[in-house]
Amino acid sequence: MNPSALDADLQARVDREELPGASYAVLRAGEVIAQGCVGWADREARAPLREDHLFRIFSNTKLVTSCAALQLVEQGRLRVDDPVGDYIPALRKLRVLKPGATSLADTEAAREPVRIRHLMTHTAGFTYGFTQPDAPIAKAYADARILHPALDLGQMCEALATVPLLFQPGAAWNYSIATDVLGHVVELVQGQALDACFRRQVFEPLGMQDTFFFVPPEKQARLASLYIGDRKEPLRPGLQRADRLPYEGAYVRPAPLLGGGGGLVSTLGDYVKLVCALSLGGAPLLAPETMRLVTGNQLPAGLWIGFPGAAMQTGRGHSFAASVRVEPCADDASSVPGEVQWGGLAGTKWCFSPREQLAVVLMTQRYAGSELPYWGEFKAVVRAALHA
């Protein structure tokens, strides 16, 4: 595969200050057929991006957590219909906002428990404060210090129990901290902190030596700089350093929070190993029958994913690991039926398409970069180059 069109597409985005730099890999049937780096790891120092640079992968962490949980399902140590309260007693009896509630006190009892499957599909009724910053629920999450780095996952779940669910479990889809809660379930079942679970269950079997919650001092020079653009007009040229996000010292100093929904740092090469394993059928992490839970939509009929302030993504469902394109959609021509994908808050992206035997991983460090259209456009360039 000739990577020139891929490099040119990303270089144009670097030139107009949409992305600071990007590295990518394209795989066909498990073989890397194109790989490259463009732009900068540090724009101010004019340090070119290399394939060994480390990236804050934010929500790409979710794939690791889901794989760890699905391994426990395979082993019979966790069942997808188990109530979460069986593992985390604080979440056994939750309150739910009534439809049309005008106050966080306007609640009713949950009609059924939050189950493991609700955590894995974002249908539990939890949320992220930053996705609804002006809503009362955001203040409630902030006041409860949910996802505060000083709280470990167990303490976070205790705090979460004081805040009502947005809807009855299983009734709707809402992107949320559910995967962080799932991470704590993994910890409890395994009897280990999440970093140790990840290392034993995922990183060591795949040979991922550069993926961690906190970068060791001897590797911190490889951590790419983080940038942010205009939040109101994302396509406006201009990037500013944002290494302090999401909090001062993040990823370089240990903290109690091991975020199963968004805490890891990784390299292009390491993350390619994970996506490649799944694209080839799951080994050595998951059995083929378990992979059907990764590649198949697990949402009820007629329920699609959708983010606050945006239209529902008709035809896009969610498996027990990530979003799945179920039906063709003119609004997302870059995805094909069966394609599994997700991304992170700093713009890191991945997908694999079993039907095409195709996988793509893209790494960049543009905070709130997922709001930009580069991913769909880049996938279109990849598929055009495949058929050139």
Image (tube, rainbow, N blue to C red):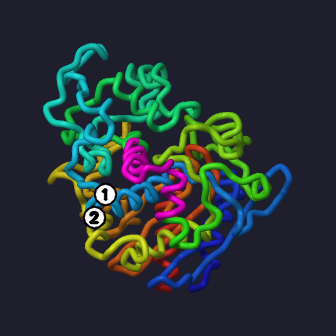
Horizontal and vertical percent position of residue 172: 23, 40
Horizontal and vertical percent position of residue 30: 48, 82
Q: Decide which of 80, 301 is in the foreground and name it.
A: 80
Residues at badges 2 and 1 in contact (C-beta under 8 Å)? yes
Q: Decide which of 335, 244 is in the foreground and name it.
A: 244
Q: Please indicate, yes or no, whether residue 328 appears anywhere in the rendered image.
A: no
**In the figure, is residue 66 to the left or right of 250?**
left
Q: Please indicate, yes or no, whether residue 25 appears anywhere in the rendered image.
A: yes
Indicate the quadrant where residue 135 lies. Answer: top left
At horizontal 65% and vertical 54% (from top left) the residue drawn is: 19
Residue situated furthest front in the rendering: 191
The type of residue carrying mark 1 is Phe
Query: Looking at the figure, which quarter contains the N terminus?
Result: bottom right
**In the figure, is residue 3 to the left or right of 260?**
right
Please report whichever mark, 2 or 1, sits nearer to the chain's N-terminal start. Answer: 2
Residue situated furthest right in the rendering: 45
Q: Name the residue under label 1.
A: 320
**In the figure, is residue 325 to the left or right of 55?**
left
Q: Decide which of 53, 236 is in the foreground and name it.
A: 53
At horizontal 35% and vertical 22% (from top left) the residue drawn is: 162
Few, some or many C-alpha atoms within 10 Å of disc 2 (few <14, some 14-19, many ≥20)? Answer: some
The type of residue carrying mark 2 is Leu
Q: How far apart are marks 2 and 1 (CA)?
A: 6 Å
Compared with 323, 256 (above or below) is above
- Element assignment for label 2: helix
Q: Residue 99 carries which label?
A: none
Q: Residue 293 carries which label?
A: 2
At horizontal 74% and vertical 67% (from top left) the residue drawn is: 50
Q: Give the range drawn in magenta.
A: 181-201
Q: Is the magenta stretch mostly helix, strand or loop?
A: helix
